[in-house]
Amino acid sequence: MTILSADKVVTPDGVLEPGWVSVEDGRIARVERGLPERTDRHVHVIVPGFVDIHCHGGGGASFDSADPEECVRAAAFHLEHGTTTLVASLVTATPDDLERRASVLAELADDGVVAGVHYEGPFLSVARKGAHDPTLLRAPDAETVGRLLKIPHVRMMTLAPELDGGLDALRRVRDAGVIPAVGHTDATYDVALEAVRSGARVATHLFNGMRPLNHREPGPILALLEAPDVTVELVGDGVHLHPSIVAHIARTAGSARTALVTDSIAAAGMSDGEYRLGGLDVEVRDGVARLAEGGSIAGSTATAAAIFRQTVLTSGVALEDAVRLAATTPAALLGLTDRGAVAPGLRADLVLLNADLRVETVVTA
């Protein structure tokens, strides 16, 4: 048995100051207030392992590569930075390429390296394409949607519901037991409401890649925020969103409906320079990734740990709420009831933080 103690242990019931956690056979055995008689490690804060439902790569490696070893490196990089559960996201590509890439990731999901696959494309709006190749974007025909859904371990598919067949596709994704997400969309408010009624459960990186909020045509942002069954993703890296927006959405949508995501690419954890996202050239300057042509933001270079820290220290979100955003809520969205919190019986996926909320150690089941 391993005993970990901390000045603060963040549990579903609040923050224990101080507190301790015992780990046995990969599970959390006890969580108690106070200090134990003995401890194997004492840190400032203990939180659950982060759960990232939108990640394209990191550490110089990309999930789009279709190279199992490269995909393992990307997952390992994020694990070192506290992400103990990760859904691998694929950007727009041809259906054949997406099938091939997703099949590689499905095998890694069998091994527990990733928690599943997220298709971010190709059924997206050209008008809100962001860092997706517009020549490969397409309407969601039933055959192609069906092909992609047949790959094992598909967790989520992002679509623009205003496209021809978009609402039908959302329903088909829902009926397949996959999470339907709305993103990279130019939908009106009314169409976005139809998407919610058709089963949409996630707003892919809310605000980014969407028709902006307008007082005469609210667009998808307000419709998704109003929907009680929709979880909204926030890329809280300080680039995609102003810190005050993260705080506002966490407060108004609530921590049970808000999930912090990295949307990170291969450049995460790397130096400035030139990279690729899908088939597009990306330039990273001062840690910000943008398309070489057009200058659109092209994912992030952040880790879940960095976004968690920013959410607490810059956005001012309470520590226990930030834990829900970074771990509890995304785990619940995925139906993973064995993780996402520091509680007895759950997997011992833990992140040990110092006083500056930087990762000291990552413990995994």
Image (spheres, helix red, strand yellow):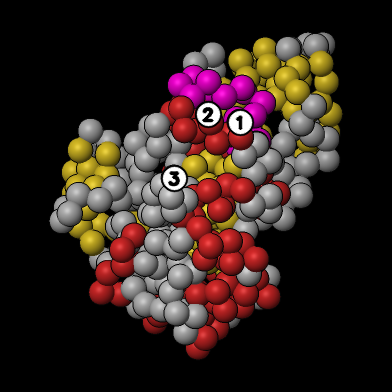
The residue lying at 79 percent from left, 34 percent from top is: 343
x and y percentages locating residue 235 in the rendered image? 45, 41
Q: Nearer the viewer, residue 161 or 50?
A: 161
Name the residue beneath numbered marker 1: 251
x and y percentages locating residue 197 in the rendered image? 65, 66
Nearer the viewer's eye, disc 3 or disc 1? 3
Is the C-beta separation of discs 1 and 2 under 8 Å? yes
Q: State how far apart marks 1 and 2 are (Cα).
A: 6 Å
Q: Going by the image, does 82 lie left or right of 363? A: left
Query: SS for tag 3?
Result: loop
Q: Main secondary structure of the magenta part?
A: helix
Residue 326 appears in the rendering: yes
Q: Is residue 58 magenta?
A: no
The residue lying at 73 percent from left, 12 percent from top is: 17
Q: Which quarter of the rendering shows the N terminus? A: top right
Tell me which amino acid carries mark 1: Arg
Q: Going by the image, does 355 lie left or right of 164? A: right
The residue lying at 61 percent from left, 34 percent from top is: 252
Q: Residues within 10 Å of mark 1 (few under 14, many from 20)?
A: few
Is the C-beta separation of discs 2 and 3 under 8 Å? no
Q: Which residues are magenta?
A: 312-325
Name the residue beneath numbered marker 3: 215
Between discs 2 and 3, the one toward the N terminus: 3
Name the residue beneath numbered marker 2: 247
x and y percentages locating residue 348 in the rendered image? 71, 38
